[in-house]
Image (cartoon, rainbow, N blue to C red):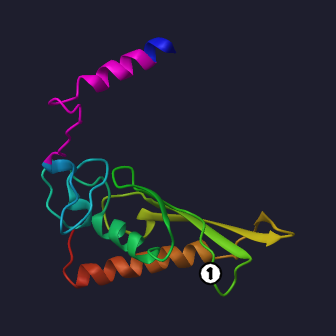
Amino acid sequence: MVVAVVTGLSGLSACQTGDSGAVSYEPSAPTRTRERGIQLFGLGSSVFGGEDTSGAKIGVNALLWRAALDTVSFMPLGSADPFGGVIITDWYSDPATPDEQFKTTIYILDQRLRADAVRVSLFRQVRSGGRWADAPVSDGAARQLEDQILTRARQMRIAGTDG
């Protein structure tokens, strides 16, 4: 443990510049946020339509990816992996129903725009006695969300928004 701390501190001291001991860091171009989009995992921002300087490409259908993000944009984003095709939201509670919250996991399964290329898992909790407890999701709710994502992807394709 002590060795790890000493190694870490000596590594940090190697970063010092000048007499003031201040550490200077200027992010390289591939790690900065671009004006036309954001970057994930330090790679180019082609995921959201920006310039891709790394040559990395998204691993799933870009229209489905963007449509999924658009569809759940009202929910806080927990994590997004465009190469594995997984979007996980954090819990969201509609102000109209504060004792109920939802969380989604969206899987983009293919590089083609197909109905079976998107799968949604929907989770629901209700507050009872001040504690959140898992509750069943209504039949077909996940399928309705999948349909909304597919509809949005088709709209984007018709509008000429390509991935």
Secondary structure character of the magenta stretch overall: loop
Q: Left or right of 24: which side holds 101? A: right
User: Residue 9: percent from the left, percent from the top?
Assistant: 36, 22
User: Residue 22: percent from the left, percent from the top?
Assistant: 23, 36
User: Residue 41: percent from the left, percent from the top?
Assistant: 31, 48
Q: Dot 1: within a 10 Å radius of its alpha carbon, few (fewer than 14), some, or many (20 or more) residues?
A: few
Above-or-below relation of 157 to 39: below
- Identify the residue at the far top of this view: 3
Q: Left or right of 5: which side holds 12? A: left
User: Residue 114: percent from the left, percent from the top?
Assistant: 37, 68
The reply to whether the magenta stretch includes residue 6 is: yes
For disc 1, the marked residue is: 94
| Quadrant (top left, top right, bottom left, bottom right) of the C terminus | bottom left
- Identify the residue at the far right of this view: 129
Q: Nearer the viewer, residue 111 or 26?
A: 26
Query: Residue at 44% of width from left, 65% of height from top?
Result: 116
Chain part drawn in magenta: 5-28
Q: Type of residue at label 1? A: Asp
Residue 101 found in image quarter:
bottom right
- Identify the residue at the far front of this view: 19
Q: Nearer the viewer, residue 44 or 109?
A: 44
Residue 48 found in image quarter:
bottom left
Above-or-below relation of 148 to 33: below
Query: Residue at 30% of width from left, 52% of height from top?
Result: 59
Query: Residue at 17% of width from left, 29% of height from top?
Result: 19
Kind of element beneath mark 1: loop
The reply to whether the magenta stretch includes residue 23 is: yes
Above-or-below relation of 127 to 110: below
